[in-house]
Image: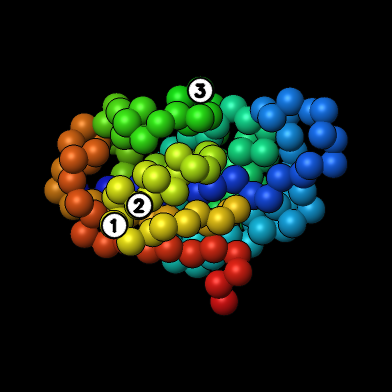
Amino acid sequence: MKRTLVLVRHGKSSWADADLPDRERRLAERGQRDAPMMGRRLAQEGVIPDLILSSPACRARETARLLAVALQYLGEIALDERIYEGEVCTLLALIGTLADDKKCVMLVGHDPEFTALAHRLSRGITRMPTCAVARFLFEGAPWSVIPGRVPVRVWFDCPKQP
């Protein structure tokens, strides 16, 4: 069975209110524009998540919601505290607990953790700019062993790529 892991760094966030706690920062106008665009690109590639997991931070939740609309995803967007400032080992542990009935799972989160995870899985991705998408295809393995596997294919896209 093929499994696809999609990592999405949240869209560009607003710094308009410097006193706002980090978790409450919303998307900037650019983030509100880029997230649906990246969702449409994923839809054109035939990416249909069975599950979207997001950091509970406002900018990540907004990004996940905008992606879901563009992808016509009708499921729940689940919030997972481990995605907010979760180290790579924590994110890998989360991936290892995913239900095997899910073929495609999208995680929406933050840097520097998502760059570190994308690099670990790809050995090539060295930067996840805002709203960047890294997709990893794994073959013939349950989610529980994915953290120790090498993907058979890796895709990378970001808003500034044509």
In this rendering, is residue 43 above or below 110? below
Of residues 11 and 53, the one drawn nearer to the viewer in this rendering: 11
Identify residue for label 1: 123
Which x, y percent locates residue 18? 82, 34
Identify residue for label 2: 119
Q: Is 84 placed left or right of 24 in the picture?
A: left
Secondary structure category for the residue under label 3: helix
Of residues 42 and 151, the one drawn nearer to the viewer in this rendering: 151
Which x, y percent locates residue 148? 18, 40
Circle number at residue 81: 3
- C-beta proximity under 8 Å, tags 1 and 2: yes
Secondary structure category for the residue under label 2: helix
Which x, y percent locates residue 157? 49, 64
Camera-nearest label, 2 or 3: 2
Q: Amino acid at mark 2?
A: His
Q: Residue furthest top?
A: 81
Of residues 18 and 57, the one drawn nearer to the viewer in this rendering: 18
In this rendering, is residue 71 above or below 105? below
Q: How is the image coloured?
A: rainbow
Q: Amino acid at mark 3?
A: Glu
Camera-nearest label, 1 or 3: 1
Secondary structure category for the residue under label 1: loop
C-alpha distance separating marks 2 and 3: 22 Å
Q: Is 137 placed left or right of 83 in the picture?
A: left
Q: Amino acid at mark 1?
A: Arg
In this rendering, is residue 43 above or below 4? below
